Amino acid sequence: RKEVEQDPGPFNVPEGATVAFNCTYSNSASQSFFWYRQDCRKEPKLLMSVYSSGNEDGRFTAQLNRASQYISLLIRDSKLSDSATYLCAVRTSGTYKYIFGTGTRLKVLA
Amino acid sequence: DVKVTQSSRYLVKRTGEKVFLECVQDMDHENMFWYRQDPGLGLRLIYFSYDVKMKEKGDIPEGYSVSREKKERFSLILESASTNQTSMYLCASSLKGNGYTFGSGTRLTVV
């Protein structure tokens, strides 16, 4: 089993839709979690961190479920510009390195 | 904003050449990382460094080495380039356990 897993998609959704992605992790000692956005042929860019209590940034909501060992990203009112690949990143306590999922591709359709 | 600069956006090298990929960050971050990204395999950690002159192997260090002589600079070296090292190489830096800032990447083709 991979340490960090994501559904590769693509998720094809119409503009204005709500879409959610999950990312599962296998190490229960995982401590820090982030979501990144990566546009085609570009570098990943930090989208948001994921806190235990859940956090929101505009149309984006990130949540952590420690019991089931997954994090989620919810995008409301999808825009064409949200089309990208979304990567999750997980860090285990005692290290500063992150393990990345392979990403979930989102296509928002007009 | 932190800036992570990679010296080349595109490189084409011949099999057997020694290749240097340079990465410089401007925010005094202790941690620096080299990843490669391949379709279907995602980001895989090659080497990382938590301090000057310090280096640690990541998940796929074979065929690579690194150098960190100054805090702001982390170099990746392909000792003898091979075609299976054709990939997108991404450098990243971070402050302690915070999220990464990535450079814009170097797309290396080995022919």
Image: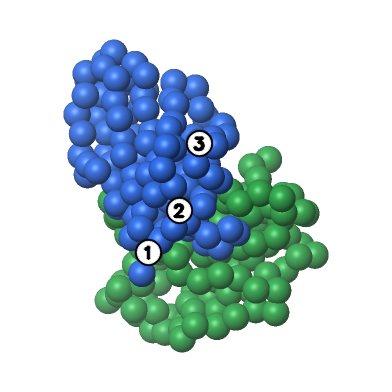
Chain colours: A green, B blue
For mark 2, name the chain.
B
- Do we see residue B105 in this rendering? no
Amino acid at circle 1: Val
For marks 1 and 3, the one nearer the N-term is 1
Which residue was labeled with disc 1?
B2
Name the element at disc 1.
loop
**What is the x, y in percent for residue B41?**
47, 39
**Closest to the observer, A51 or B3:** B3
Q: Residues within 10 Å of mark 1 (few under 14, many from 20)?
A: some
- What number is the disc on residue A1? none
Q: Are marks 2 and 1 in contact (CB under 8 Å)?
A: yes
Residue at 28 percent across and 41 percent down: it is: B106
Question: Which dot, 1 or 3, sits closer to the camera?
Answer: 3
Is B53 on the left or on the right of A3, as rendered? left
- Do we see residue B54 in this rendering? yes
Q: Quadrant of residue A105?
A: bottom left
Which residue was labeled with disc 3?
B53
Which residue was labeled with disc 2?
B93
